Image (spheres, rainbow, N blue to C red):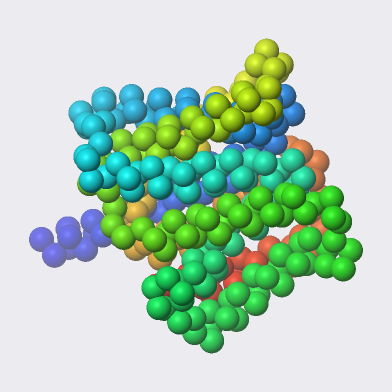
Amino acid sequence: MTVTGSASVPTSQAVGKALLLVTAFGWGLNWTVLKFVLQDWPPLFARGTAGLLGALCLALLAMARGDSLAVPKGARAPLLVAASINVFAWMGFTALALNWLKVSEGALIAYSMPIWAMMLAWPLLGARPTRRSLVALGLSITGMVVLMGGPDFSAAKLPGVLFAFAAAVLFALGTVKARKPLAMPGPAVAAWQVALGCLPMVALSLMLEQPQITSLSTQGALGLVYMAVGPMALCYLTWFGALKRLPTAVAATSMLIVPVVGTLTAVPLLGETLGARELIAIVLTIGGVALALRREA
């Protein structure tokens, strides 16, 4: 009995790590694929439409599993807040940021969110940052300064930097303010969050961006399908599966692979450059975030 039990733990962890790799690659590649769709559709419409399609996939999956899509009365307000911060702000602002930034720039700034969660926990929860936390903050900020060019920073990139930074801070705020998970099945929660967060994006886009729906190319359509089925649906399931098998700190730290995948795939697919400046920025920024996450372990 002991041998069987001890063997099942490594097996479960191996499955969890495999699921994490699928999640990280799917979410990382999404940054590059989104750039393709943005060539045909404006950012809010592209991200919002993909999200609604992804929410439909998640809802169908939930029903196939026999899960209820009903939202308990006590979960409605938290669900709306989570959808606003974790989906509308995160997905919408990161999509807008790519109008001004390269994938490497947008992804690294956005995935600095654990740093800001750590800093927001001080005034909101009374969790004072340690010396290690301050070193982590310094490393990440230095990395982002290097990435943006330091003294040679182009003001043309400022809107993108602000959108990516706002996405990171708001997502971090949602993480800090979250008290407990909603009493709903994972796929149902994800379906509702994505749908409620993406519907306003599409509505705003129709009013402000006035997208030309028929302008979507074959390449853009394939990218849209990937965004809906991969990052929005499949990767949510692999993420939930990984969290069941691995410690949260391990899963969170592994997600630092996401901006690296986004940066590396953008080089052959989009022709973006990856020089010494980008490599130094990746090491500094991700090193800082990893140090902050290690504090939580």
Q: Is residue 81 above or below residue 203?
A: below
Q: Residue furthest left?
A: 1
Hey, which quadrant is residue 93 in on the image?
top right
Foreground of the two, 173 or 261: 173
Say which quadrant the N terminus sits in.
bottom left
Instruction: Report if residue 273 is visible in the image.
Output: yes
Hey, which quadrant is residue 222 in on the image?
top right
Residue 102 on image: x %, y %: 75, 47
Foreground of the two, 175 or 231: 175
Residue at point 41%, 54% (across, down) = 17
Residue 98 on image: x %, y %: 71, 43
Q: Is residue 113 above or below residue 75?
A: below
Residue 107 on image: x %, y %: 64, 52
Foreground of the two, 166 or 262: 166
Question: Is 142 left, or right, of 184 in this rendering?
Answer: right
Residue 92 on image: x %, y %: 58, 40
Residue at point 72%, 24% (across, down) = 40
Q: Residue furthest bottom?
A: 131
Q: Is residue 118 above or below residue 272?
A: below
Residue at point 70%, 36% (across, down) = 35
Foreground of the two, 46 or 73: 73
Q: Residue furthest front?
A: 207
Hey, which quadrant is residue 201 in on the image?
top right
